Amino acid sequence: MRRLKLKTGMLLILSAVLFLTGCTSGEKKSQDTDTRTKTAQRQKAWKKAETSPWGKYPETVTYTLGQMKGTGNSNLPEGETYENNAYTRYLKKILNVQNKNIFMESEEGYDEALNILVKDRNLPDIFLVSDRETLEELVENDLIEDLTDVYKSCASDRIREMYEGYGDELLESGTFDGKLLALPETAIDHGPQLLWLRRDWIEQLGLTEPKTLEDAFSVIQAFQENRMGAERDEEPVGLVCDPGLVGTVSTSYSMDAIFENFGAYPEQWIRNPEGEIVYGSLTEETKNALSCLHDLYSRGILDPDFALRAQNNIRDLVVEGKCGAFFGLWWTPNNPLMDEYRQNKDADWQPYYLTSGARRQVEVYSTFRDNKYVVVRKGYEHPEIVMKVLSVLFDYSRYEADDTEEMNAYFALNVDPTARPLMINVDYNEATYMVTRHIREALYGSRMREELSAIEASYFDACKKYLGTDSPSVEEWAAYKSRITAVGLLVDASYHPPERKYMGDGDSEIPQTLQQLEKKAFIQIIMGKKPLSYFDTFVKEWYRKGGEALTESVRSGKMSGTD
């Protein structure tokens, strides 16, 4: 009987052990299954993030960044930084990425400072390149990542549409041996130069607003004769002019409008009406434009000290109310006029589009030598971040999202684009004019605010506030003056950007010696130190000092799209 009880007890214990062992094994199997499931989900989340425009990383990805910073902290609100602002916070919210800026330089010193990093092979994960020679050096030394697959998987459909709107040449400018190694900025058309005049001075002198360039020159001459903006011991300034005479797409104070009015395109390669490729600084049209500028100088209309001016010095003349006339693009109210308006709200700057009748009779070629690119350090494990950031900033946040109020407020606050982690812009070629047309339609009631993109809605709100108050903020004034007044002139004139034709890298770059020869000759002719006939001597000298061989090299097929 006792043995039976023992056996029964042992059986019960053994059963309990087996039961507990089975439970433990089952729990372990269940835990293993849960772990495998979580791992698979995690891998799926990473895969989705790495291969889609807007997929969010399951963990924060921090990348080191080389950034071109703007003046005045890019006009960010107080307390904001390049690592913590509306852009970076939104990107962290949507993508879970965070930039760590280990290299920052202003535009003036950026290229030189970056060259040092390139020589030392000490590169950030992601950085901006604004010098073609530096980009080519990075490519030749295999220092940057291939972004071909990144573009295919992480560029949104709208971003690809934007790039395609510029033709094949734009993306090809960042492509080497069939590999996309650099993402280019889209060269949005900024339109022609406008002549900005102090309309309050026009009214004060009882003058008529100009309808032609010659009318405008008479107005400026009246400013001079009446010493507008000049103190007792100062000479009046006149039409301010950058000593470089012609500028890039972002330069104010140049004389491009006057040259173009004569059908002249200095510092650019052109195909003339006879079908020849020539350097635009050497044409008869350029000679005629220089004759006009000499006349303006002789009449005291052109700033007598223009040859001695620097960009910052010219800007100070405008902001301090010393001058009442200069050529600038549509965004001039944002820079430099905001600063003058902040000090003197009676300064009524008005843009005039006085060269609408000038039509290009020749093909003018652009290059990508001054274009900006975003590149990724060779070996960085998340090269797709650049394409995801661009897709979020220039597509998702503008056209899809409804949670971008903080970021969109930056437009009205005139925060500079350098505040963004990747300082390039991606947009449609005619985006400037599209935005203004849509804002005006909303202001006049033919379009609902809800139909506007994020950037359009932000500017619409600022413009509506400007129209609804007698004391608008400086940001509201700049938004209305640039987007409605200035761009509105171009929209009303049915302006459309001319077709872009691009020149390959080849040997088209003008050597420094020829650049200096040209600048000296032009300034001497304008100031009357050399007669106009000296232009012909300059042309012969330009060809003799290397220009002839350079021209032959360009004509031999170095340009894309010239065959």
Image (tube, helix red, strand yellow):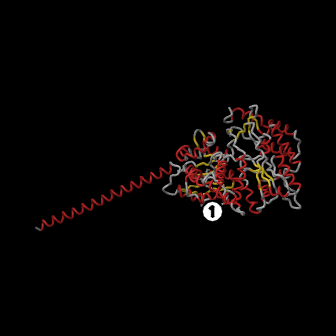
Of residues 357 and 124, the one nearer the viewer is: 357
Task: Locate residue 272: give its quadrant.
Answer: top right
Extreme front residue here? 445
Does residue 119 show up?
no
Extreme left residue here? 1
Instruction: Please state the horizontal and vertical placement of residue 404, each as a whole percent of the image.
Output: 58, 57
Is residue 201 shown left or right of residue 166? right
Of residues 1 and 194, the one nearer the viewer is: 194
Does residue 228 show up?
yes
Q: Secondary structure at mark 1?
A: loop
Of residues 462 and 145, the one nearer the viewer is: 462
Instruction: Please state the horizontal and vertical placement of residue 271, each as a whole percent of the image.
Output: 74, 35
Is residue 199 shown left or right of residue 112? right
Amino acid bearing label 1: Glu
Instruction: Please state the horizontal and vertical placement of residue 540, each as a whole percent of the image.
Output: 83, 36
* Relative to 4, residue 324 above or below: above
Instruction: Please state the horizontal and vertical placement of residue 413, each as a whole percent of the image.
Output: 66, 60
Q: Quadrant of the N terminus?
A: bottom left
Which residue is at 44% across, 52% downward? 43
Of residues 92 and 333, the one nearer the viewer is: 333
Task: Locate residue 236: give its quadrant.
Answer: bottom right
Q: Which residue is labeled 1 in the image?
A: 80
Q: Quadrant of the C terminus?
A: top right
Task: Locate residue 549: give its quadrant.
Answer: top right
